[in-house]
Amino acid sequence: MSGPSTREALLEQGALLIARHGVARVTARQLHEVVGARNESALHYHFGNIDGLVAEIVRVHLDEIEARRAPLVVAIAADDLTGDLRALVRALAAPMADDLDTPVGRAHLRIVAQLSHPAMAYEMPFQRTEAPAGTAVVKWLWRALDTLPEAIRTERLALLRAQLLSGFGLRAQFLDDLSSSDGPATNPLFVENLVDVIVAGLCVDPSPEAVAISQGVRTR
């Protein structure tokens, strides 16, 4: 294989292996064998190590999601839907849904779900990559929920992130393990139902107990 093709093969086959077995269980030897690389230093040459490969897989995935999300954000702004919760949540979910249709796309969803630390939900989103479309959606969501106490808004957006990542990661695993062809046909229903569930959770009135607790929580 030539250099560039070996690099692409490592990205693709590495994603498939890591999604199935996890980062800790995949070795450089396995990666070289699966891509047919004669040079056992190919991984080091292109990515440094497995962590570097994973970082590049995630970067490619996030860049692709951002590219799909950008026209949705333009449409939301043009149609004056920046306060429409369903339009905003769907702009986060729909670009991820496209990855359910391919083995590599599903691998990307599974890897991101595996690697996402819960603490990241409380950081400013989309700071680890250049993602103006994703950042715009989150800012609009924050404003759309401005009737909620700040601490509750923070928790709800953290749950939104968790639901998206875990939901798509589990759906991808389900499709990979599925022996019939029924799954892909129901993907649109899965996506729209997931959006419905998330929107319902975002806009439900907080309980008196949650409000009382939020009043004593230090906000960011």
Image: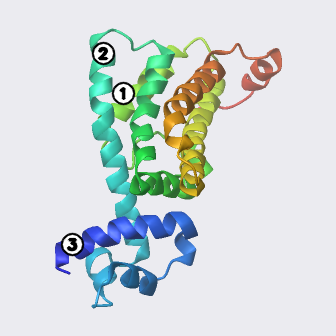
Residue 212 sits above or below residue 20 on the image: above
Kind of residue at badge 3: Ser
Observer-nearest of 3 and 81: 3
Q: Which residue is mark 3?
A: 5
Observer-nearest of 78 and 189: 189
Numbered disc 2: secondary structure: helix
Q: Earlier in the sequence, mark 1 or mark 2?
A: 2
- Label 2 to label 3, Cα distance in Å? 40 Å
Q: Do callouts 2 and 3 mark residues in contact (Cβ within 8 Å)?
A: no
Q: Residue furthest front?
A: 180
Kind of residue at badge 2: Ala
Q: Do callouts 1 and 2 mark residues in contact (Cβ within 8 Å)?
A: yes
Observer-nearest of 160 and 42: 42
- Label 1 to label 2, Cα distance in Å? 10 Å
Whether residue 129 is visible here, answered yes or no, is no
Look at discs 2 and 3 and give the one toward the viewer: 3
Numbered disc 3: secondary structure: helix
- Residue placed at 28% from the left, 90% from the top? 38
Q: Residue furthest top?
A: 80
Look at discs 1 and 3 and give the one toward the viewer: 3
Q: Residue furthest right?
A: 209
Give residue 158's quadrant in the image.
top right
Q: Earlier in the sequence, mark 1 or mark 3?
A: 3
Q: Which residue is mark 1?
A: 136
Residue 106 sits above or below residue 196 on the image: below
Q: Position of residue 164 (x, y in %)?
A: 55, 38
Q: Which residue is mark 2?
A: 77
- Residue placed at 27% from the left, 76% from the top? 46
